[in-house]
Image: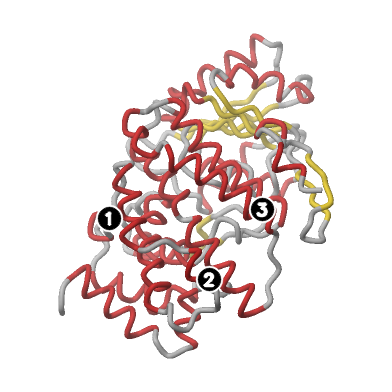
Amino acid sequence: MNEILNLALNDMAKTEFDCSCGRHHNFSIQDIAIGKGALTELPRVAAPFKEGKVLLIYDNHTYEAAGKRALALLQEAGFKNIKELLFDTGDDVLIPDEKTLGRILMEQDLDCDVMIAVGSGVLNDSTKFVSSRTHVPYIICCTAPSMDGYVADGAPIIKAGVKLSPLATLAYGVVGDTDIMKDAPMDLIHAGFGDVVGKITALADWDLSVKINDEYRCDTCVELVRRALDKCFSKSTELKERNEEAILYLIEALTLTGVAMGLVNISRPASGAEHMLSHYWEMDFIARGLTPNHHGTQVGVATPIIAEFFEELADILPEGTGEMCPPRTEIEELLRSAGCPVSPVELNINRELFYNSLINGYKVRPRFSIMEFAKNNGRLEAIAQKITNRIYGEA
């Protein structure tokens, strides 16, 4: 029982066990290879599809980072039927919308056996979504430690300008080479760290809903995430130097959070009110024709804001919930230690958008959070105004 807590990350593939939470957990990803030089493991991970048709997907950035070598490794290993799909976006950001998803679907042959995506957030989520609809398995080669979705079964996408997170599928395999990820753009490393920081308030939100709504929780998964956070945060100051151990702890934290989500089949271990604010800001930027900030960067900035909600509502929180969330200032210092943005002002989020997100952000997802708790207790508007004034000054 709870054996997963004693396993190394790369040994967690195909894990199945009876848990102390009362459920039987099954983590169906077939292979995980994360570490130094792990890209060389790609032919082994993809070996069951060697004689079949492969759709290899990357953009112009990830092709240079790892795609070119991934293609060469597969060819050298005897993969003969590889079709390439290159998204050439120039300096623009690829969006996981109808255009991107449709392009992958159009390039996927009817007898395609596997898709291999070389990239991070958008390419992973887009390929994952198509995989779930066509039932063609996919492998992800991570190029940046930028988000927690590599081993999760949700696929955040944009549909008609609205951010959705439909249930998709788990990857067949995950390959993450720290030699590659340590050289990722620093803004993507910051995004990954921000996403990890967001787990602080996500776990507190989960605890709140357990106590208010009697929601299910798996304490094994909570412990799995907490251990990963502690390791990652212990090396936060070394991320700025691209220290390989710090990068390893970062991608491990992101991946283990995904494992936790996969075990319980919900995103509670990773996502709470801080993600709702990020989604709100992202949808607003897209609606105005602006390039949104990285998801994880926004999550990081949103986390101390949500922590402030917990502080403001401490007098009415269920016993023990407030202690799960550190003070706002402590989380802000954690972000600064890694060189991450701390204020929404740094992300070009204006006062009106910020205030509206605090008032309406809880509506983004049908999930109970500290913001909805504030609304239900008649204190949302006052807290939103107080936080807005602190950041932007008196109106």
User: What percent of the width, then of the height, locates residue 241?
Assistant: 32, 28
Q: Is residue 387 above or below residue 104?
A: below
Q: Residues within 10 Å of mark 1 (few under 14, many from 20)?
A: some
Residue type pointed to by label 1: Leu
Ranked by sequence position, the earlier of labels 2 and 3 is 3
User: What percent of the width, then of the height, locates residue 368?
Assistant: 56, 75
User: What percent of the width, then of the height, locates residue 345?
Assistant: 23, 60
User: In the image shown, does 187 or 86 lie closer to the viewer?
Assistant: 187
Which residue is at the far top?
A: 76
The reply to whether dot 2 and dot 3 touch (C-beta < 8 Å) is: no
Ranked by sequence position, the earlier of labels 3 and 1 is 3
Q: Residues within 10 Å of mark 2 (few under 14, many from 20)?
A: some
Q: Residues within 10 Å of mark 3 (few under 14, many from 20)?
A: many
Q: Is residue 228 above or below residue 292?
A: above
Q: Secondary structure at mark 1?
A: helix
Residue at screen point 47% across, 37% down: 145
Residue at screen point 70% across, 16% down: 79
Residue type pointed to by label 3: Cys
Mark 3, residue position: 221
How many numbered discs sit on the rendered protein?
3
Residue type pointed to by label 2: Thr
The Cα atoms of the two marked residues, 3 and 1, are separated by: 32 Å
Q: Quadrant of residue 384?
A: bottom left
Mark 1, residue position: 347
Residue at screen point 54% across, 60% down: 271
- Could one spot residue 105 in this view of the protein? no
